């Protein structure tokens, strides 16, 4: 290959129209062939005897004026001029600086300073326009530079370099990451311009009373070292405070028994008086938690919790001896009480799996406990100790516990810690397994033991003067019993069908059956199921329940099923008339109801709060249907229609000393509207109404001459939570 010939040629100014002036050698040529000015310059300077007439047909560069204008603003790059007389020396020119051209004659164009060489695939006949020139610090697409071989160190005696982790780049530990953001918050009334730089900062710079953004009272940030008690060692201590206001306005009606000696209307001879009444209740619940740990992704290491509830209630009825045992007392009652609903310590014992945080914890004190999915057997806040945890990536949950039942306030139902606890204990063990027996179903097996030893105590009188233990039925003797509940529950779905089911068998011994004054075996059964189908914003439900009744109260077997402390979320719950209201068992016992408030079982108890379980009862059968309609994210409508029966009426016939009592109780029709204006649980309003239409069995027990057969229950409930 011939050595390249290189020359640096000054470019003189161009006049309009492409004329070049100033050089006496080139000037005549430019005037004759202005389009070949660059070729003429190259031929004259390189000394090659190139005729312009030979170069002109092969000239592939733009006109001289355009070349000059194109070369000035672009980076150095080669441009090619072809000639048939110089096949062995292709002629190139390129920008070397403002006002200069670098010319070369070779088989290749010289590379521009700092630029990649041209692609080897490019042929000699290719033309590179100015816009396609190489630019500094840019790679040509498709061209890969060959890297040198990697040098590996093979020196056993050399000191190894530290691992990359020893040199943190963009990460470093921060002892208090919450303080970094809050330190940017401007002072109240100060310069707020920082929000312009960090708009999302406003979500953390809020008042401590703001429940919708981060604040220290919600446990979003840990307590600072200088603002927490000295006994709280180490870091990551969080404080959580919550307050709930629960308001109830409840007009209602129910068969109101009244005696001739207590009526305020002496000309009335009916056993049942005016049915209308009104209940008002205001409850404020305040909860406080102090816990340690990163609870966003694992259980707390330790938690201290206290919940107090204060209630003021007012009841207005139309007959005497409904609110107080003394007939001289008025028909209105206003009461108040403060109860301790939670007071426990929860200690994290350890973890089974550190990667999934399967754990085991111990909780001691007054705490909530629910024995099954829907609260059929036991749902209450009681004094006890509980060991609980999970395994297998939370597919298995377990509970072991023992509870000593506290006395309840009569009119509010809150826990009374100033009274001696009852001689009534509950022991339980349950196990939950997800995706068993089918994927989408959660199964639960449970064993619950209720040991009651209140037989040796004196008669228990409630705050209104009515006896509650033992219930004034039969021989009026005190009772004690042992009963074991074996249960199986399932909750989940199969395909598009949602399923909830519960089955119990109760087995044990009653030390004194109030019909025979002898020991009696307890053999009773319970089953409930709900099937539902979701169609977009609507859910349609079918529900059924069976609780066995006692068909022979005078034998040595009690076959009526009763729970320990029920609070069922089923068949409309407290929207339902039969679940919400208590029907007094007039004529068969004193201060005894056919059912209990917020209970579905026909168990003939004095109350579920202070009374004892009773397995001499008529049982319960329920069939119904319902639907829920989510009209929007804030509004839901629900409706339920249920029909109820007694399973066995022998107990009712024996206590009322009358003939056959029909088993049909009646129709319970209810509807409810729930409105959550903020689409969360901080503000919830609920309005429900229920109508009860008695059937033959109910009318036979509670006939009211000259009065409407229909009974109603209206409930307005407002919940405000912080």
Image (cartoon, rainbow, N blue to C red):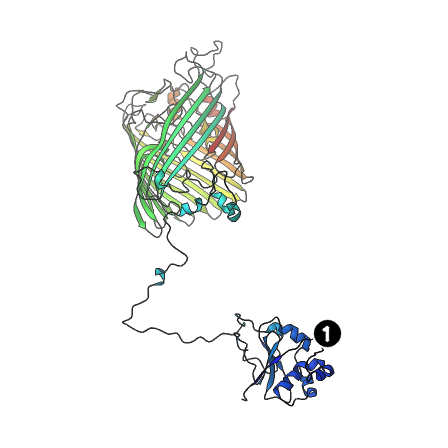
Judging by the rendered image, the residue that carries numbered circle 1 is: 16
Q: Quadrant of residue 414?
A: top left
Say which element carries label 1: helix
Does residue 585 appear in this view? Answer: no
Q: Quadrant of the C terminus?
A: top left
On the image, the x and y values in percent for residue 334 come to: 43, 19
- In the rendered view, does 423 fall on the left or right side of 280? left
- In the rendered view, does 34 fall on the left or right side of 301? right
For this rendering, which residue is in front, 139 or 616? 139
For this rendering, which residue is in front, 525 or 260? 260
On the image, the x and y values in percent for residue 233 come to: 30, 42
For this rendering, which residue is in front, 444 or 602? 444
Q: Residue at x 62, y 85 (%)?
A: 45
For this rendering, which residue is in front, 491 or 515? 491
From the viewer's perspective, is residue 297 above or below residue 644?
Answer: below
Q: Residue at x 61, y 82 (%)?
A: 125
- In the rendered view, does 518 fall on the left or right side of 215? left
From the viewer's perspective, is residue 48 above or below residue 272?
Answer: below
Q: Quadrant of residue 462?
A: top left
From the viewer's perspective, is residue 652 above or below residue 349?
Answer: above
- In the rendered view, does 49 fall on the left or right side of 188? right
From the viewer's perspective, is residue 148 above or below residue 320?
Answer: below
Q: Quadrant of residue 420?
A: top left
On the image, the x and y values in percent for residue 599 come to: 42, 30
On the image, the x and y values in percent for residue 336 come to: 40, 22
């Amino acid at each position: 290959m011939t050595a390249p010939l290189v020359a640096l040629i000054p470019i003189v100014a161009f006049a309009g129209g492409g004329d070049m002036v100033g050089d006496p050698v080139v000037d005549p040529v430019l005037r004759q062939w202005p389009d070949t000015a660059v070729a003429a310059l190259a031929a004259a300077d390189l000394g090659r005897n190139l005729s312009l007439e030979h170069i002109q047909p092969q000239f592939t560069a733009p006109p001289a004026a355009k070349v000059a204008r194109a070369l000035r603003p672009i980076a150095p790059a080669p441009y090619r001029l072809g000639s048939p007389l110089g096949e062995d020396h292709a002629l190139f020119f390129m920008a070397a600086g403002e006002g200069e051209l670098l010319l070369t004659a070779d088989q290749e164009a010289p590379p521009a300073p700092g630029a990649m060489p041209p692609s080897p695939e490019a042929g000699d006949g290719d033309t590179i326009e100015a816009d396609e020139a190489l630019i500094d610090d840019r790679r040509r697409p498709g061209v890969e530079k060959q890297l040198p071989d990697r040098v590996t160190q093979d020196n056993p005696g050399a000191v190894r370099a530290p691992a990359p982790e020893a040199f943190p780049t963009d990460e470093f530990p921060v002892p208090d990451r919450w303080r970094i953001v809050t330190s940017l918050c401007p002072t109240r009334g100060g310069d707020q311009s920082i929000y312009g730089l960090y708009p999302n900062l406003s979500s953390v710079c809020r008042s401590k009373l703001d429940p919708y953004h981060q604040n220290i009272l919600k446990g979003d940030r840990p307590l600072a070292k200088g603002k927490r008690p000295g006994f709280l060692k180490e870091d990551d201590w969080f404080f959580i405070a919550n307050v709930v206001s629960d308001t109830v306005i409840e007009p209602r009606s129910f068969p109101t028994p009244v005696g001739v000696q207590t009526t305020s209307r002496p000309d009335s001879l009916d056993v049942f008086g005016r049915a209308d009444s009104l209940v008002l209740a205001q409850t404020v619940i305040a909860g406080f938690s102090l816990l340690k740990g990163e609870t966003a992704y694992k259980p707390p290491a330790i938690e201290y919790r206290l919940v107090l509830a204060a209630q003021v209630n007012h009841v207005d009825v139309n007959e005497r001896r409904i609110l107080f045992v003394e007939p001289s007392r008025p028909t209105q009652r206003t009461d108040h009480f403060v109860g301790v609903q939670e007071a426990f310590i929860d200690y994290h014992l350890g973890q089974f799996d550190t990667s999934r945080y399967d754990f085991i914890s111990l909780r001691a004190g007054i705490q909530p406990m629910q024995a099954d999915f829907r609260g059929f057997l036991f749902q209450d806040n009681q004094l006890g100790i509980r060991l609980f945890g999970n395994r297998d990536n939370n597919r298995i949950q377990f509970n072991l516990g023992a509870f000593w039942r506290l006395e309840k306030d009569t009119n509010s139902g809150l826990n009374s810690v100033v009274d001696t606890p009852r001689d009534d204990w509950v022991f339980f063990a349950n196990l939950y397994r997800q995706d068993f027996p089918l994927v989408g179903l959660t199964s639960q097996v449970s064993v619950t033991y209720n040991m009651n030893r209140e037989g040796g105590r004196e008669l228990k009188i409630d705050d209104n003067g009515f006896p509650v233990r033992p219930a004034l039925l039969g021989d009026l003797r005190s009772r004690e019993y042992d009963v074991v509940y074996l249960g199986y529950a399932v909750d989940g779905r199969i395909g598009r069908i949602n399923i909830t089911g519960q089955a119990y068998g109760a087995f044990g011994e009653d030390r004194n059956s109030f019909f025979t004054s002898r020991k009696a075996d307890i053999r009773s059964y319970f089953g409930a199921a709900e099937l539902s189908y979701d169609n977009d914003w609507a859910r349609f439900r079918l529900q059924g329940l069976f609780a066995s009744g006692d068909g022979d109260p005078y034998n040595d077997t009690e076959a009526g099923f009763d729970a320990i402390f029920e609070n069922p979320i089923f068949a409309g719950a407290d929207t339902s008339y039969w679940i919400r209201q208590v029907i007094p068992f007039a004529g068969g016992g004193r201060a005894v109801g056919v059912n209990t408030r917020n209970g579905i079982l026909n168990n003939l108890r004095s109350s579920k709060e202070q009374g004892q379980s009773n397995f001499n009862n008529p049982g319960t059968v329920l069939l119904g249907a319902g639907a829920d309609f989510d009209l929007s994210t804030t509004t839901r409508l629900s409706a339920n229609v249920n029909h109820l029966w007694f399973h066995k009426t022998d107990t009712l016939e024996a206590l009322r000393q009358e003939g056959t009592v029909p088993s049909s109780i009646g129709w319970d029709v209810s509807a409810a509207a729930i409105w959550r204006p903020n689409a969360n649980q901080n503000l919830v309003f609920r309005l429900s109404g229920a109508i009860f239409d008695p059937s033959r069995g109910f009318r036979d027990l509670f006939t009211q001459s000259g009065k409407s057969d229909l009974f109603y229950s209206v409930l307005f409930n407002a919940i405000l939570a912080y």
